[in-house]
Amino acid sequence: MEEQLKGLRKSMKKTTFKQLDFSAQQRKEVHKKINKSYENDEDIFLAVLRLLIHEKTGYELTQLLRGRGIQKFEENEGFLYTLLHRLEQNHFIQSSWDYTGAKYYQIDNKGRKILRKAEKNTAKKRFIFKELMQE
C-alpha cells in the first residue's frame, strides 16, 4: 500500500501539483491547520456528560476524551478539572470520594435532562440535513 501511495505522490507531482510551489511558511501553516483541534466548548460539555453516565475518575475521563479526539485539554488538564468543577457547582454532575482517595464523577438528574435535550436537537439537525442532501 505504501508503494502505491508513493507512486500516487510522484504522479501528482508531475501533473496535479506541478505548478504549485509552497514556501516553508505556507507548509507550516497548512500543517498547523490540519492538526488544529476544532471542537468547541459545547461539544466537550456534551461529551463529558455522555461519558459520565457511568461513574468515572478525572483520569479515566481524560483517557476517554482523548480517545474521542478531543484535545483541547491535552496540554492543560486544569481545563478539564475546571469544567468538572463548574458542572458540579451547576448540579449537572455530582462527585464522591472512595476509600483510596480517588474522586469519582457522575451525571446528575439536571445533567441528564440537558443531555436528552441536546441529543434531541442533534437528531433534529441530522434529520433536516439528511432531507436536504436527498433533494
Image (cartoon, grey):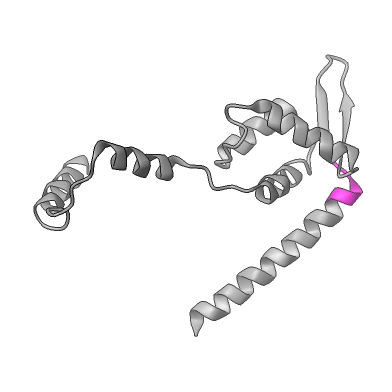
Residue located 90% across and 37% down the image = 89
Residue 106 visible, this angle: no
Q: Please provide percent x and percent y for residue 129.
A: 57, 73
Residue 13 visible, this angle: yes
Lateral position of residue 72 relative to residue 83, left or right: left
Q: Residue 13 or 97: which is nearer the viewer?
A: 13
Lateral position of residue 75 relative to residue 24, left or right: right
Residue located 61% across and 69% down the image = 126
- In the image, which residues are magenta? 106-111
List the single residue furthest toward the left: 14
List the single residue furthest toward the top: 100
List the single residue furthest toward the bottom: 135
Q: Please provide percent x and percent y for residue 26.
A: 30, 43
Q: Residue 3 or 93: which is nearer the viewer?
A: 93
- Residue 86 lies in what quarter of the image? top right
- Residue 62 lies in what quarter of the image? top right
Residue located 21% across and 40% down the image = 2
Lateral position of residue 59 relative to residue 88, left or right: left
Q: Please provide percent x and percent y for residue 56.
A: 76, 32
Residue located 80% across and 62% down the image = 117
Q: Is residue 59 magenta?
A: no
Q: Residue 7 or 91: which is nearer the viewer?
A: 91
Screen quadrant of the N terminus: top left
